[in-house]
Amino acid sequence: MTTEILLVEDDRKLATLVRRFLEDHEFVVTAAVDGDQGWQEIQRRSFDLVVLDLMLPGRDGLTLCRQIREAGGSGILILTAKGSQADRVLGLELGADDYLTKPFGLPELLARVRAILRRVRPGKEAAPKGTRAVGPFRIDRQCRTVLRAGTSIDLTRSEFDILDRLSRNPGRVFRRDELLEQIRGGSTDAFDRAVDSHVSNLRAKIEEDPRHPAFIQTVWGVGYRWAAS
């Protein structure tokens, strides 16, 4: 069972660092760069936890915190600048579960994330590390290898990242920009066709008939999804 986290942080370098760290610990992370995009993601689907910077362009973090709590369901961990005690207190009063002051260590972030999840999602933990079976494939995130019937499939870094993210969320549709963020580490100076090219190459390696894919399905005008079993 996957654990979905929404990270709302306008510092792209910090967001990329946090997202990759949490994904290395088997969480599924969606990143938003401002409060408005974060709210759009929350309206689109549910998350187990929202990691929320208070100092955001557009819709501010305190407003978003209140809206998330009113919508219900998600745990909230707020990130605050050093010394902003009033904002921390107000964030907790608006319904945040905990706060973390910048700069922070990633191990402390992980500990607070897990503590909140134990409270808001008792019994639901992130999937353990190691090899996992997905249909006929065995995927090892640590070694970044994919096997089919015992035979290794040679994938590029981008192909592996796309395969890994899609297959961990069967049935969920990923927009091209979400997959682009995954393979570019948060950079936006690329274009959607790069994703189409990677998906085409990936299908050629894993599908019996790439023209009629059984695993990676196209959702026209939106993006791609892994066929739910």
Image: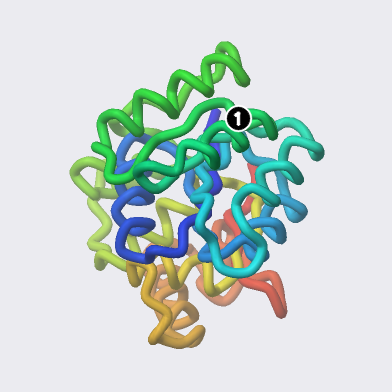
In the rendered image, residue 64, in percent from the top left (x then y), is placed at 68, 50
Write the residue at 23% across / 62% down: 154
Q: Is residue 117 left or right of residue 113?
A: right
Write the residue at 49% across / 80% down: 196
> Which quadrant would residue 36 be assigned to in this image?
bottom right
Q: Is residue 102 left or right of residue 169?
A: left
Question: The residue tagged with tag 1: helix, strand or loop?
Answer: helix
> Which quadrant would residue 91 be assigned to in this image?
top right
Using the image as rendered, state which of residue 206 and residue 69 is in the foreground. Answer: 69
Quarter of the rendering occupied by the N terminus = top right
In the rendered image, residue 150, in percent from the top left (x then y), is placed at 26, 41
Q: Is residue 78 left or right of residue 163?
A: right
Q: Is residue 30 left or right of residue 181?
A: right
Using the image as rendered, state which of residue 51 and residue 135 is in the foreground. Answer: 51
Q: Residues within 10 Å of mark 1 (few under 14, many from 20)?
A: some
Q: Classify 222 as above or below 146.
A: below
Write the residue at 29% across / 53% down: 17
In the rendered image, residue 208, in percent from the top left (x then y), is placed at 48, 63
Residue for badge 1:
92
In the rendered image, residue 82, in percent from the top left (x then y), is placed at 35, 44
Write the residue at 52% across / 15% down: 118
Residue 190 in view, yes or no: yes
Farthest-out residue, top: 123
Using the image as rendered, state which of residue 82 and residue 168 is in the foreground. Answer: 82
- Count all numbered tags in the image, as a single digit: 1
Using the image as rendered, state which of residue 147 and residue 190 is in the foreground. Answer: 190
Q: Classify 107 as above or below 173.
A: above
Q: Amino acid at mark 1?
A: Leu
